Image (cartoon, grey):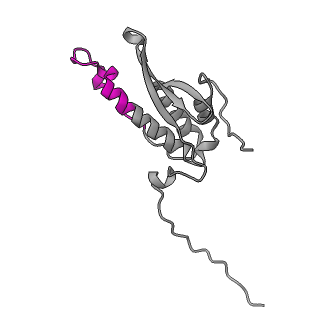
Amino acid sequence: MADTIADTRRLFTKPQNLNDAYGPPSNFLEIDVSNPETIGVGRGRHTTYEVRLKESCVRRRYSDFEWLRAELERESKVVVPPLPGKALIRQLPFRGDDGIFDDSFIEERRQGLEQFLNKVAGHPLAQNERCLHMFLQEESVDKNYTPSKVRQA
């Protein structure tokens, strides 16, 4: 029998970009971020957003989205898309407008947060992260949770 030599040439594949990584898969979840609500006064004033999935609805603030992004970067092996900016200049005093509480800014941020969530939820590896499930379904985010994968039935 003739000796066979294994083919060890490297396969050349197209590099993955954010659109490829976060394109809608066949089991795509549609997530809506809506109904922004500004609450509190002074330094405690903040805006929350309604995050609605088919069977659940929770309210989240921007810092919760920052937490989710940091957890996904730390725990998963996926490239996590950016969040809409922090808008530090809008937080300066004496601007003559409502800064980060201006309706147009809140709407722009809402759209960015919705895009972020839909990209993350569309990634097959991110879909198994416990932090994403908790973010989308539990009333409050337990930031001291134990990271793990969610098993699909």
At a point 49% along the width and 30% down the height, the residue shown is 65
In-image side of 60 versus 82 (left or right)? right
Numbered disc total: 0
Residue 8 screen position, x and y as percent: 61, 74
At a point 69% along the width and 39% down the height, the residue shown is 150
Determine if the magenta segment contains residue 136. no
In-image side of 75 versus 85 (left or right)? right
Which residues lie in the magenta part? Answer: 83-109
Given residues 29 and 46, the one toward you in this image is 29
Which image quarter: residue 101? Answer: top left
Residue 53 screen position, x and y as percent: 57, 35
Determine if the magenta segment contains residue 84. yes
At a point 54% along the width and 32% down the height, the residue shown is 52
Which image quarter: residue 142? Answer: top right
Screen quadrant of the N terminus: bottom right
Screen quadrant of the C terminus: top right
In-image side of 102 versus 33 (left or right)? left
Task: Give the answer, above or below, for where 23 lies relative to 59.
Answer: below
Residue 33 screen position, x and y as percent: 47, 32
